[in-house]
Protein backbone atom coordinates (compact mmCIF):
# COMPACT_ATOMS: atom_id res chain seq x y z
CA UNK A 1 0.00 0.00 0.00
CA UNK A 2 1.33 3.43 -0.91
CA UNK A 3 2.10 5.82 1.92
CA UNK A 4 -0.29 8.79 1.80
CA UNK A 5 2.62 11.19 2.33
CA UNK A 6 4.50 9.90 -0.73
CA UNK A 7 4.09 12.30 -3.65
CA UNK A 8 2.51 11.02 -6.84
CA UNK A 9 4.69 11.11 -9.92
CA UNK A 10 7.13 9.14 -12.02
CA UNK A 11 8.68 6.06 -10.47
CA UNK A 12 12.21 4.73 -10.62
CA UNK A 13 13.71 8.21 -10.96
CA UNK A 14 12.09 8.86 -14.35
CA UNK A 15 11.56 12.51 -15.17
CA UNK A 16 8.11 13.76 -16.12
CA UNK A 17 7.71 14.41 -19.82
CA UNK A 18 8.45 18.00 -20.79
CA UNK A 19 5.40 19.88 -21.94
CA UNK A 20 5.20 20.09 -25.71
CA UNK A 21 5.61 23.53 -27.18
CA UNK A 22 2.55 24.81 -28.96
CA UNK A 23 2.85 25.42 -32.70
CA UNK A 24 3.33 29.15 -33.33
CA UNK A 25 1.45 31.11 -35.97
CA UNK A 26 2.77 34.50 -37.10
CA UNK A 27 0.04 37.12 -37.36
CA UNK A 28 0.96 40.02 -39.64
CA UNK A 29 -1.62 42.81 -39.55
CA UNK A 30 -1.39 46.56 -39.01
CA UNK A 31 -4.75 46.56 -37.19
CA UNK A 32 -4.26 45.74 -33.48
CA UNK A 33 -7.92 44.72 -33.08
CA UNK A 34 -7.63 42.11 -35.82
CA UNK A 35 -4.36 40.84 -34.32
CA UNK A 36 -6.04 40.43 -30.92
CA UNK A 37 -9.06 38.65 -32.43
CA UNK A 38 -6.91 36.24 -34.44
CA UNK A 39 -4.65 35.64 -31.42
CA UNK A 40 -7.66 34.81 -29.22
CA UNK A 41 -9.04 32.43 -31.85
CA UNK A 42 -5.69 30.68 -32.29
CA UNK A 43 -5.22 30.37 -28.52
CA UNK A 44 -8.64 28.75 -28.22
CA UNK A 45 -7.64 26.30 -30.96
CA UNK A 46 -4.39 25.32 -29.18
CA UNK A 47 -1.85 27.50 -30.98
CA UNK A 48 0.58 30.10 -29.77
CA UNK A 49 1.03 33.24 -31.83
CA UNK A 50 3.53 35.98 -32.49
CA UNK A 51 2.13 39.31 -33.63
CA UNK A 52 3.72 41.63 -36.17
CA UNK A 53 2.40 45.15 -36.81
CA UNK A 54 3.95 45.15 -40.27
CA UNK A 55 5.56 42.87 -42.79
CA UNK A 56 9.08 44.16 -42.28
CA UNK A 57 9.31 42.59 -38.84
CA UNK A 58 8.44 39.16 -40.17
CA UNK A 59 10.74 39.55 -43.18
CA UNK A 60 13.70 40.09 -40.81
CA UNK A 61 13.05 36.76 -39.04
CA UNK A 62 13.43 33.15 -40.07
CA UNK A 63 9.82 32.47 -41.05
CA UNK A 64 10.45 28.73 -41.29
CA UNK A 65 10.04 28.51 -37.49
CA UNK A 66 6.30 29.17 -37.78
CA UNK A 67 3.61 26.55 -38.21
CA UNK A 68 1.74 29.03 -40.41
CA UNK A 69 1.50 32.73 -41.23
CA UNK A 70 -1.71 34.76 -41.18
CA UNK A 71 -0.97 37.69 -43.51
CA UNK A 72 -2.93 40.88 -44.17
CA UNK A 73 -2.27 42.04 -47.72
CA UNK A 74 -3.04 45.69 -46.90
CA UNK A 75 -0.09 46.55 -44.65
CA UNK A 76 1.23 50.04 -44.02
CA UNK A 77 5.00 49.47 -44.04
CA UNK A 78 5.47 47.12 -47.01
CA UNK A 79 3.17 45.49 -49.52
CA UNK A 80 1.56 42.28 -48.32
CA UNK A 81 2.30 40.88 -51.78
CA UNK A 82 6.01 41.56 -51.21
CA UNK A 83 5.81 39.75 -47.87
CA UNK A 84 4.03 36.85 -49.56
CA UNK A 85 6.74 36.61 -52.24
CA UNK A 86 9.41 36.71 -49.53
CA UNK A 87 7.70 33.90 -47.62
CA UNK A 88 7.32 31.79 -50.75
CA UNK A 89 11.06 32.19 -51.46
CA UNK A 90 12.41 31.87 -47.90
CA UNK A 91 9.93 29.51 -46.22
CA UNK A 92 8.06 27.67 -48.97
CA UNK A 93 6.82 24.91 -46.64
CA UNK A 94 5.05 27.31 -44.27
CA UNK A 95 1.36 27.69 -45.11
CA UNK A 96 0.22 31.29 -45.57
CA UNK A 97 -3.36 32.30 -44.85
CA UNK A 98 -4.17 35.63 -46.44
CA UNK A 99 -6.54 38.07 -44.75
CA UNK A 100 -8.55 40.38 -46.92
CA UNK A 101 -10.35 42.99 -44.83
CA UNK A 102 -13.27 44.94 -46.12
CA UNK A 103 -16.21 46.81 -44.70
CA UNK A 104 -19.52 45.11 -45.47
CA UNK A 105 -22.54 46.89 -44.02
CA UNK A 106 -22.33 46.93 -40.24
CA UNK A 107 -19.66 44.28 -39.86
CA UNK A 108 -16.05 43.69 -40.74
CA UNK A 109 -15.42 40.46 -42.62
CA UNK A 110 -12.00 38.84 -42.46
CA UNK A 111 -11.92 35.76 -44.67
CA UNK A 112 -8.76 33.69 -44.70
CA UNK A 113 -7.40 32.08 -47.86
CA UNK A 114 -4.60 29.54 -47.87
CA UNK A 115 -1.93 30.24 -50.44
CA UNK A 116 0.10 27.22 -51.61
Image (cartoon, rainbow, N blue to C red):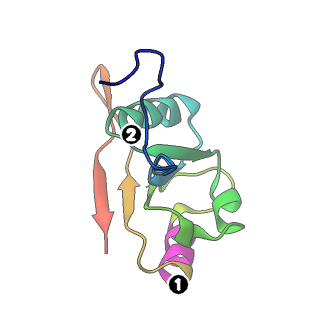
Residue at mark 2: 42
Q: Secondary structure at mark 1?
A: helix
Gap in Å between the C-alphas at discs 1 and 2?
25 Å
What quarter of the picture does the N terminus occupy?
top left
Corner quadrant of residue 92: bottom left
User: Is residue 23 on the magenta stretch?
Assistant: no
- Give the class, few, some or many, for how many residues have Cα within 10 Å of label 2's Cα (few <14, many ≥20): some
- Give the numbered dot on residue 114: none
Residue in view at x 38 percent, y 57 percent: 98
Q: Is residue 40 left or right of residue 89?
A: left
- Residue at the image position 41 percent from the left and 35 percent from the top: 43
Q: Position of residue 105 (x, y in %)?
A: 27, 24
The prevailing secondary structure element of the residues shown in magenta is helix
Residue picked out by circle 1:
89
Assess disc 1: are there few (<14), some (14-19) or many (≥20) residues with their C-alpha within 10 Å of its C-alpha. few
**The residue stretch that appears in magenta:** 81-88
Q: Quadrant of the C terminus?
A: bottom left
Residue at image coords 43%, 71% = 94
Q: Nearer the viewer, mark 1 or mark 2?
A: 2
Quadrant of residue 61 within the rendered picture: bottom right
- Which numbered disc, 1 or 2, marks the residue that appears first in the sequence? 2
**104 is higher (above) or lower (below) than 48:** above
Question: How many marks can you see?
Answer: 2
Measured as percent of width and height from the top left, residue 69 is found at 46, 59
**Secondary element at tag 2:** helix
Image coords of residue 11 (percent x, y): 42, 44
Q: Outermost residue, bottom direction?
A: 89
Amino acid sequence: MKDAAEPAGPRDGAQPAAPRALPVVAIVDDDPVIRRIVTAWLTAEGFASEEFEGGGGLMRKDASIYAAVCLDLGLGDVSGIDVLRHLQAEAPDVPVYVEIEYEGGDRLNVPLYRID
